[in-house]
Amino acid sequence: MSLVAGVDLGGTAVNYTLLDQQEKFLIDGLCEHPALVKQGPEVCLRQIADGLKIAADKAGVLLSDVVAVGLDTPGPASAAGQLSTRGATNFVHPHWAGFDIREGLAQKLGKPVSYLNDANAAAIWGHYAIFGANSRETSISIVIGTGNGGGIILDGSVVKGKNGFGGELGHVLIPYQSIAGTPGIRPHCNCGRTGDLESLCSLTAIERNLLPYFLPRYPGHELAKLDPHQAAKLVRGLADKGDALCKDVFRVQAHALGLFFDEMVNTFDPDALIVGGGALEASKEFQQRFLNEIRVGMPAQREEQANIPIYVMPNGDTAGARGAAIEALKLARQSGLM
Ligand SMILES: [Zn+2]
């Protein structure tokens, strides 16, 4: 039996999955261990290798059957997996600066390793869940979490870009002034821009831009009494229950995404648009309302493009590991290992 593994290395946890030749995942939910990223490359890579053995045991397969491994991490890193020399939020230990994490893991495991940033890995999973592993379709995925990540799968292949920044969709500017009911809003993003997708469509956007904008318009609202960081986390649940302010927040997020998707429709003429992330971990009714609002926020489309489907990404919490495994499957097939 030949298998590939997916390893999703986050700031606090590392999640594993295994995928066989028939494209069947051998681990259903999360297979997670605490990540030792803070302790630097040597400790972290050893722990990833140990965790992979645990994952193989859990799935009842041999580690020696794993012929290739897909790794994904938060960026910034090059398309080939070299972490930024200026450091990264999730890789603060000094030995990580400029470290080639893909090559490091390949040496540690003695197996070929493919690399993706976490948003692109999630986009590959979203695409695969709809079209399968050998598709030639084009999809645009957006993952709404603390920030806003995503990815472009063009004719079946992920767009990594020359510097690894391909599909950095959260920082694409949108014409936010045209969103109804938000006169005078000035949404700032951590990246320094005003009015990019992340500045309106992320958990950080709720805390920094949308609650400060809407709370004065709803005098006496219960969220005004809370610390903004805590209040932001309650917005999705309250919107799901019908709270007017929180519904306004999600309407603006959906309309921002509608404007962004319109840009992508005109750029790529895609087969599908996909939305995932914590923002959509709510009731089915909430998800459907959100998808409907995205459509409302999209300017009129050409007749041929009016029915491009919008999907909710399945298995959101395992998306990174699954996408990394699919990339490893591609590597294994191209290298004749499978
Ligand atoms: Zn930005």
Image (cartoon, grey):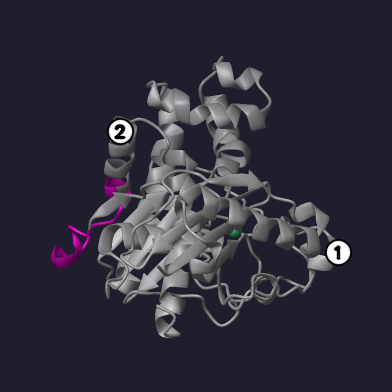
Q: Is residue 241 inside the magenta stretch?
A: no
Q: Residue at x 47, y 31 (%)?
A: 236
For the residues labelled 2 and 1, say whether their Cβ atoms are less than 8 Å apart: no
Residue with the most extreme left position: 303
The answer to which of marks 2 and 1 sits earlier in the sequence is 1
Q: Residue at x 62, y 60 (%)?
A: 74
Residue 298 counted in the magenta span: yes
Q: Residue at x 83, y 59 (%)?
A: 93
Tag 1 secondary structure: helix
Instruction: Name the side, left or right, on which 88 lies relative to 55.
Output: right
Q: Which residue is mark 1?
A: 94
Q: Position of residue 106 (x, y in %)?
A: 64, 74
* Label 2, residues with CA under 10 Å away: few <14, some 14-19, many ≥20: few
Image: magenta residue range: 295-308
**Residue 284 disc label:** 2
Displayed quadrant of residue 268: bottom left
Quick check: can you spot residue 124?
yes
- Nearer the camera: disc 2 or disc 1: 1
Residue at the spot x=57%, y=48% of the render? 187
Residue closest to the eye, 125 or 152: 125
